[in-house]
């Protein structure tokens, strides 16, 4: 019987294949509109999914200022400012761009940590950006953002597991990950 050898090249091909598959999934989620399953009231805290080129896949915390017709809201962003930086930015957004604020995840994060290929949000540039863990060096996780093509290192305290608002409830996307320990062991053997 022939022996099957797993080479670094096969491992790298598998890694690129997984990255491509997860990237396609993230892009399909980022480019779709939220389900309209809830009416928001003045004062509700929400997240607004940006549909602007270069910002797709990002979510910004906001407060509902008012309802504008049946399918729009006026929102005031918590972290985005007007062009002259004098006040919080207010704008009209479609109901399909608005979702409730996801539940806090601090207990989940401290118990599990992150694994390669986990879908996460990163708090950067005033909002939460959707991507997935592509690697880990030291205490920093590399996150790949399929909508921008960036791969950037972040400390764990600015990461959260990505969740989708579906049928009126929060859904954790299945963990895609693999633990980093085997990769670190194989790297240390080669040094």
Image: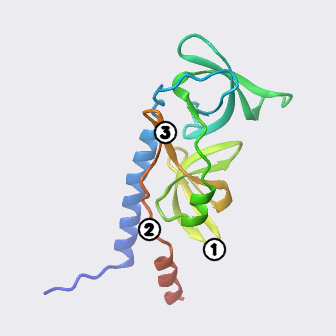
Q: Give whichever of discs 3 and 2 has the lower sequence position.
A: 3
Res 155 visible? no
**Viewport quadrant of the N terminus:** bottom left
In this view, the residue in front, 59 or 56, is 59
161, above or below 90, in the image? below
**1 or 2: mark nearer the eye:** 2
- Point out the residue furthest to the top here: 69
Q: Which residue is mark 2?
A: 178
Q: Which residue is mark 3?
A: 30
Residue 33 point in image, percent of width and height: 47, 30
* Crowding at mark 3 (Cα within 10 Å: few <14, some 14-19, many 20+): many
Question: Residue drawn at (58%, 42%), measured in percent from left and top?
Answer: 102
Q: Measured from the top left, where is residue 36 in percent x and y?
A: 48, 25
Tally of marks: 3
Circle 1 SS class: loop
Q: Residue at x 60, y 71 (%)?
A: 137
How far across and down, in percent of the image, does residue 69 sit? 58, 10
Q: Which residue was labeled with disc 1?
A: 138
Q: Is residue 20 visible?
A: yes
Pointer 2: residues within 10 angstroms few (<14), some, or many (20+)?
Answer: few
Q: CA distance from mark 3 to mark 2?
A: 23 Å
Mark toward the start of the polypeptide (1 vs 3): 3
50, 68: nearer the viewer:
68
Say what secondary structure mark 2 lies in: loop
* Nearer to us: label 3 or label 2: 2
């Amino acid at each position: 019987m022939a022996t099957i050898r797993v080479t670094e090249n096969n491992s790298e091909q598998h890694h690129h294949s997984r990255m491509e598959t997860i990237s396609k999934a993230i892009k399909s989620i980022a480019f779709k509109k939220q389900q309209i399953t809830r009416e928001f009231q003045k004062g509700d805290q929400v997240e607004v999914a940006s549909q602007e080129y270069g910002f797709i896949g990002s979510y910004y915390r906001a407060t509902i200022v008012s309802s504008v017709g049946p399918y729009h809201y006026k929102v005031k962003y918590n972290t985005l400012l007007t062009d002259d930086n004098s006040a919080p930015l207010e704008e009209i957004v479609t109901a399909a761009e608005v979702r409730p604020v996801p539940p806090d995840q601090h207990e989940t994060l401290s118990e599990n940590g992150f694994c390669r290929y986990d879908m996460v949000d990163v708090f950067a540039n005033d909002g939460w950006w959707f991507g997935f863990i592509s690697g880990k060096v030291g205490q920093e996780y590399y996150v790949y953002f399929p909508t921008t093509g960036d791969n950037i290192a972040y400390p764990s305290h600015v990461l959260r597991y990505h969740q989708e608002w579906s049928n009126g409830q929060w859904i954790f996307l299945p963990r895609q990950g693999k633990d980093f320990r085997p990769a670190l062991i194989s790297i240390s053997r080669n040094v």
